[in-house]
Image (cartoon, coloured by chain):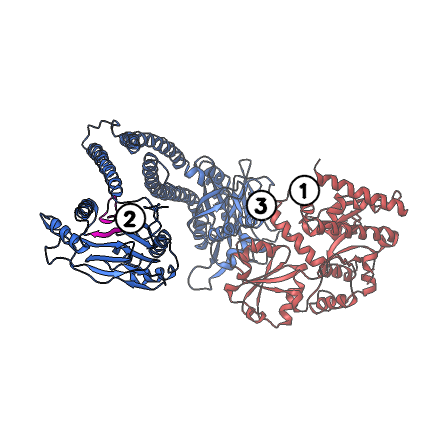
Chain colours: A red, B blue
């Protein structure tokens, strides 16, 4: 037994004792919780997988099953049909669903800043937003497109939008001059296709008035109402998972790689390492370990205006209906 | 450091050091040149191997690419019937074994008006040709890379490799060629869709596995984006890119290599292999049609394994050779220096006085032989010289002995018993004669002519040594003889008589300064004759000092001349007469200054109240010695002091 695995076992034991001594509510009578993630296992979800692997959920008195996402998994369908109790969504997408009448509530805004960005090759002579005029810009369809489209419209750019299903190959081949990517994901793929950062111009949406955070935890209003206390424990345990993952990145990466292999997904350590590091920048943008799951009304309104302007929604759901501050990290 | 070492050691050290230096220079040169040659030849071989592989792979890609290109040609020139199209495609897939499948995907409405997606796809499945339409809206082929990229670029494109849809581990690649119609040159020539073929890339793995690159060298293949398509580590295949590895290893050089490769460059690089951590050489070249890039990894250690073995053997031979060389040098230098060492032993003996020590026999006529003969000559000469020296020394010792005897004889002919007349109270005498050499030419003498008359003389023979001493002896003998024969003769007469005798047959032309006086002890009358001698001093009873400075003629033996006259003075009791030779006044100190009469007078002045002739004599002698100090005595030092006490002669 390696020292590391020994530690893995010791930590839950310590937590278990702590909870037992504080005589916090017993978990025996709670029903198992099912969580569905937006995408296949990757470091974007390190907190959930770490919390489960280390038994942090159990210590918080909840039994969590994770349903990995993927191209063939619809998170909203899973929640609607009751296949899952909780799901992760980008804030924008969840808002659209709620606007369509699905009674989702945000119980934790985990991501704190936008990871969305536009990347151009400097060789295309793009250095400022106005340089994009007359260029081809690759934009992922639907869920990722709202903000880039708002950016184009805000900057009154005359660009040719090339809708993209997935990947960056068209950008790499020169089929597009710009492409929208996630900081923690495709941007690194571009770097590791041999482009140096200094050969690329980056436009972080957060720098252009579109700092709309992404990943959050959602459930049906009814799920929350049935057991708000379990929701609270689920959120807090998840954030414990993130804390551990950020404090022990190599251990967290091991857990992620293991999950990826189990799902038969190519497990690229360098890429996952980058992703975990960026998730930390996104979840803890101020550094340190002060977590927050609070969604401010201001941010919500700002995001709502983008959707309204793009006509992605016709009315913005009320903030109080959309977001419920749950657990100790939401106290802001 | 080497100073105290033997010749043999020095010789060995210098020759060996020189040899090692030469060998080291030679070796370094040979090593660097060999290394360069090996590297050049390895580079050439690797380049050949790479180009061979590139060519054979390119042949497959090119010939395969011809299929859709020809299809496009056929298609653009008129096949617009849907049924004919299906038949045609099925035949193509069937007849081309390397093909996995082929699709013709249309722009919306391009084939069937009003139909958004139309893409017949024929592919092989268990030996059967299967038809499917890729029109599923969820798949949305218009946004797939294989469709979108060639459309946007308006040129044929090989796709990034991917795993086949069946979820197996068959790596596939798709070649997509855009087509346009109508191609009649009249109407607008518009983009209408994409023709694709899918091929398996499994054979590529085999191509690379068959590459023989030293022991553990290997080939690898990168996709256009740097992803590994072929690599010995299956975890990397279709998963990691060369840039991912570079990032994990934090290896900037590897990243640079990746950049060169995905840019389609050709080259040769020296990097650290990420897995083994060993230094390797890497030859890389692109597949021009697909944009993939291959690399050949040659472990440096294996590349230079032959050279390393050769080096080891050379090193062993060098060490053995140097040892042998050391032995030979040692032997030769021992041979050369051995007679020198023996000679050294013999010369040590000679040095210690054994002139008969046997010198080693050398037959050679080289420097050592010459040295040995020189030593032999020297030994003989030395022996002779020492023999002569012994004889000479013996002779000298004999002469010295004789001279000592001569000295004793000389001393014995002058009165040396003081006081000379112990029974007389009217006179006291003290004299010294210290020769500068074994025998001297000074003399003094005194004797009683009768009961009341004292005769006394002092003289200084010209020259020194034996001749002077003989002449002195003759002078003294003449003085005694003349004085005894002519008892009542005046000093002048006696001196004149002596002069005549000394001049006779004086072949050596020697002469003697001479002062002779006769003192009447009763009356104090003093008759004297000075033949060229230093004027004596008279200290009277009151301490007055006067010189008896009348000189009556030349020194004796110079020439027979006028008879010497006699001077007369009268002295009173208490007068002291000081006779001396120029050994006193001309005594030299180290600064070559003379003692002079002045100093003698000063000394005598101090002695004016001293009656004892011995005390006066020794005081003068002391003054002279204090003056001359360490300087060598150059002349005989002779003094005679007579203290005339007067009064009646009484026998004590």
Q: Is residue B74 above or below residue A201?
A: above
Q: Residues within 10 Å of mark 2 (few under 14, many from 20)?
A: many
**To which residue does mark 3 refer?**
B239
Contact (Cβ within 8 Å) of mark 3 with mark 1: no
Label drawn at residue A258: 1
Residue B506 in the image: x percent, y percent? 11, 48
Between marks 3 and 1 in the image, the one whose residue lies nearer the viewer:
1
B456 falls in the magenta region: yes
Q: CA distance from mark 3 to mark 1?
A: 15 Å
Quadrant of the frame with the N terminus of chain A? top right
For this rendering, which residue is in front, B393 or A151?
B393
Instruction: Assign a secondary structure to mark 1.
Output: helix
Between marks 2 and 3 in the image, the one whose residue lies nearer the viewer:
2
Residue B360 in the image: x percent, y percent? 25, 27
Residue at image coords 34%, 64%? B544
**To which residue does mark 2 refer?**
B433
State the extent of the magenta-drawn residues as a range.
B436-461
Residue at image coords 23%, 63%? B549
Q: Is residue B483 left or right of residue A42?
A: left
Visible residue check, residue B394: yes
Q: Earlier in the sequence, mark 2 or mark 3?
A: 3
Quadrant of the frame with the C terminus of chain A? bottom right
Chain under disc 1: A
Q: CA distance from mark 2 to mark 1?
A: 132 Å
Q: Quadrant of residue B581?
A: bottom left
Label drawn at residue B639: none
Q: Is residue A60 left or right of residue B302?
A: right
Contact (Cβ within 8 Å) of mark 2 with mark 1: no
Q: Residues within 10 Å of mark 3 (few under 14, many from 20)?
A: some
Instruction: Assign a secondary structure to mark 3.
Output: loop
């Amino acid at each position: 037994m390696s020292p590391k695995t020994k530690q893995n076992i010791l930590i839950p034991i310590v937590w278990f004792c702590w909870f037992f001594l504080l005589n916090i509510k017993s978990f025996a009578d709670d029903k198992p919780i099912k969580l569905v993630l937006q995408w296949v296992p990757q470091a974007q979800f390190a907190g959930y997988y770490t919390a489960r692997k280390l038994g942090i959920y159990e210590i918080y008195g909840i039994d969590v099953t994770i349903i990995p996402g993927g191209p063939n998994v619809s998170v909203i369908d899973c929640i609607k049909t009751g296949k899952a109790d909780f799901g992760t969504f980008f804030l924008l997408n969840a808002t659209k669903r709620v606007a369509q009448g699905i009674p989702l509530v945000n119980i934790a805004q985990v991501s704190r800043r936008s990871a969305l960005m536009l990347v151009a090759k400097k060789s295309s002579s793009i250095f400022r937003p106005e340089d994009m005029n007359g260029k081809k810009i690759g934009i992922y369809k639907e869920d990722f497109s709202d903000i880039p489209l708002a950016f184009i419209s805000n900057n009154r750019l005359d660009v040719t939008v090339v809708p993209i299903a997935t990947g960056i190959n068209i950008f790499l081949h020169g089929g597009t001059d710009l492409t929208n990517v996630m900081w923690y994901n495709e941007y690194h793929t571009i770097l590791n296709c041999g482009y140096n950062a200094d050969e690329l111009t980056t436009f972080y949406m957060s720098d252009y008035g579109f700092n709309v955070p992404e990943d959050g935890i959602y459930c049906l209003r009814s799920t929350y109402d049935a057991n708000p206390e379990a929701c609270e424990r689920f959120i807090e345990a998840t954030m414990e998972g993130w804390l551990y993952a950020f404090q022990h990145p190599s251990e967290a990466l091991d857990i992620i790689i293991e999950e990826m292999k189990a799902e038969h997904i190519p497990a690229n350590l360098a890429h996952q390492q980058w992703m975990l590091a960026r998730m930390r920048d996104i979840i803890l943008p101020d550094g340190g370990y002060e977590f927050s799951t609070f969604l401010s009304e201001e941010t919500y309104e700002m995001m709502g205006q983008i959707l309204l302007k793009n006509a992605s929604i016709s009315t913005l759901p009320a903030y109080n209906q959309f977001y419920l501050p749950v657990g100790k990290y939401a106290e802001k | 450091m080497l100073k105290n070492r033997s010749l043999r050691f020095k010789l060995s050290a210098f020759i060996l050091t020189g040899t090692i230096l030469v060998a080291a220079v030679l070796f370094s040169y040979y090593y660097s040149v060999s290394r360069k040659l090996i590297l050049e030849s390895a580079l050439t071989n690797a380049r050949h191997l790479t180009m061979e592989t590139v060519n054979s792979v390119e042949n497959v890609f090119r010939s395969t690419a011809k299929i859709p290109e020809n299809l496009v040609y056929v298609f653009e020139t008129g096949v617009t019937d849907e049924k004919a199209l299906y038949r045609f495609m099925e035949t193509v897939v069937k007849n081309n074994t390397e093909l996995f499948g082929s699709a013709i995907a249309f722009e919306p409405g391009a084939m069937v008006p009003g139909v958004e997606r139309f893409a017949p796809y024929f592919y092989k499945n268990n030996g059967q040709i299967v038809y499917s339409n890729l029109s599923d809206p969820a798949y949305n082929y218009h946004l797939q890379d294989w469709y979108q990229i060639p459309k946007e670029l308006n040129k044929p494109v090989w796709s990034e490799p991917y795993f086949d849809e069946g979820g197996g581990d068959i790596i596939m690649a798709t070649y997509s060629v855009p087509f346009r119609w109508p191609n009649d040159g009249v109407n607008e020539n518009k983009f209408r869709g994409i023709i694709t073929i899918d091929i398996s890339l499994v054979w590529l793995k085999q191509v690379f596995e068959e590459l023989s690159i030293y022991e553990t060298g290997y080939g690898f293949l990168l996709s256009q984006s740097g992803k590994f398509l072929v690599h010995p580590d299956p975890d990397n295949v279709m998963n990691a890119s060369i840039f991912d590895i570079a990032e994990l290893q934090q290896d900037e050089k590897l990243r640079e290599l990746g950049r060169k490769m995905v840019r389609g460059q050709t080259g040769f690089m020296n990097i650290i292999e990420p897995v083994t951590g060993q230094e390797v050489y890497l030859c890389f070249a692109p597949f021009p049609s697909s944009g993939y890039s291959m690399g050949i990894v040659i472990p440096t250690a294996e590349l230079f394994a032959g050279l390393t073995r050769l080096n080891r053997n050379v090193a062993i031979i060098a060490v053995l050779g140097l040892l042998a060389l050391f032995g030979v040098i040692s032997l030769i230098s021992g041979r050369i220096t051995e007679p020198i060492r023996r000679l050294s032993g013999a010369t040590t003996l000679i040095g210690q006085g054994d002139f008969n020590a046997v010198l080693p026999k050398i037959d050679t006529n080289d420097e050592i032989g010459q040295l040995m003969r020189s030593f032999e000559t020297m030994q003989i000469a030395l022996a002779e010289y020492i023999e002569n020296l012994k004889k000479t020394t013996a002779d000298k010792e004999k002469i010295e002995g004789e001279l000592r005897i001569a000295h004793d004889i000389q001393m014995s002919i002058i009165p040396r018993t003081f006081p000379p007349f112990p029974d007389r109270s009217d006179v006291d005498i003290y004299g010294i004669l210290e020769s500068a050499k074994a025998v001297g030419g000074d003399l003094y003498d005194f004797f009683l002519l009768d009961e009341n008359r004292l005769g006394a003389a002092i003289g200084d023979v010209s020259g020194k040594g034996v001749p002077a001493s003989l002449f002195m002896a003759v002078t003294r003998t003449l003085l005694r003889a003349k004085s005894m024969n002519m008892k009542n003769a005046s000093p002048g007469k006696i001196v004149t008589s002596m002069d005549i005798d000394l001049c006779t047959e004086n072949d050596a032309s020697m002469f003697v300064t001479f002062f002779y006086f006769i003192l009447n002890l009763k009356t104090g009358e003093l008759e004297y004759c000075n033949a060229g001698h230093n004027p004596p001093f008279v200290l009277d009873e009151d301490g007055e000092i006067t010189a008896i400075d009348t000189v009556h003629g030349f020194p004796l033996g110079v020439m027979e001349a006028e008879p010497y006259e006699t001077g007369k003075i009268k002295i009173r009791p208490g007068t002291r007469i000081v006779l001396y030779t120029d050994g006193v006044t001309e005594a030299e100190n180290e600064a070559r200054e003379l003692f002079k009469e002045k100093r003698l007078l000063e000394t005598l002045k101090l002695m004016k109240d001293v009656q004892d002739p011995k005390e006066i004599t020794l005081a003068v002698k002391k003054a002279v010695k204090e003056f001359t100090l360490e300087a060598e005595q150059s002349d005989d030092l002779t003094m005679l002091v007579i203290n005339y006490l007067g009064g009646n002669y009484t026998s004590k």
